[in-house]
Image (cartoon, grey):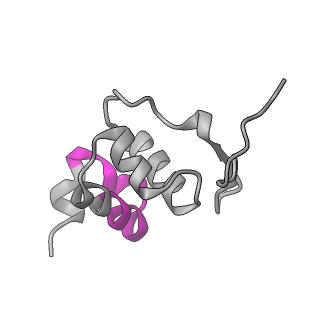
Amino acid sequence: MFVKKTDTPRTAVLPDGSILSIADLPPANTRWVANRKLAVVNAVVHGLITREEALRRYGLSDEELDGWMTAAKKHGKRALKVTSLQRFRQP
C-alpha cells in the first residue's frame, strides 16, 4: 500500500488529547452542525488543511470561517450552534 506524500501532517493531537485526522473532516456537501464546524476549525488551526483549502472545499467565505474561528476560540463549541448566535456574537 502506498501513501501519498504531503507537506501537511496526517493527524493532529488536540488540546483535550483527542486525535483529529483528515478522515474525520466532514464531506464537502455537509449540513453544518457545531461538531462539524469545530472539526473544520481545528483542522485549519492545527495545520491539517490550509485555510484556502477549507474555503474552497466547503464553499465558505472568509467572514464565515473567521466567525467560526473567533467563536470557537472565545467560547468553544457551544458558540458554533445556530441557536446561540445572539448570545455569543453580540459586540
Q: Residue 30, percent across and down?
A: 35, 29
Q: Is residue 70 magenta?
A: yes
Q: Which of 18 and 21 is in front in this view?
A: 21
Considering the image in quadrants, where does the N terminus appear? Answer: top right
- How many numbered tags mark residues here? 0
Residue 38 in percent (x, y) is at 44, 49
Residue at 43% of width from left, 48% of height from top? 53
Q: Write the residue at 43% across / 40% down.
A: 36
Q: Magenta stretch?
A: 68-83
**In which quadrant is the C terminus drawn?**
bottom left
The answer to whether 7 appears left or right of 62 in the picture is: right
Magenta stretch mostly in which secondary structure?
helix
**Residue 64, percent across and down?**
24, 55
Q: Which residue is drawn at 38% across and 39% down?
A: 57
Q: Nearer the viewer, residue 32 or 22?
A: 22
Q: Which residue lies furthest to the bottom in this view?
A: 91
Magenta stretch: residue 47 in it?
A: no
Percent across and percent down for residue 8 are 65, 54
Residue 19 lies left or right of residue 50; in this view the side is right
Q: Is 61 located above or below residue 5 in the figure?
A: below
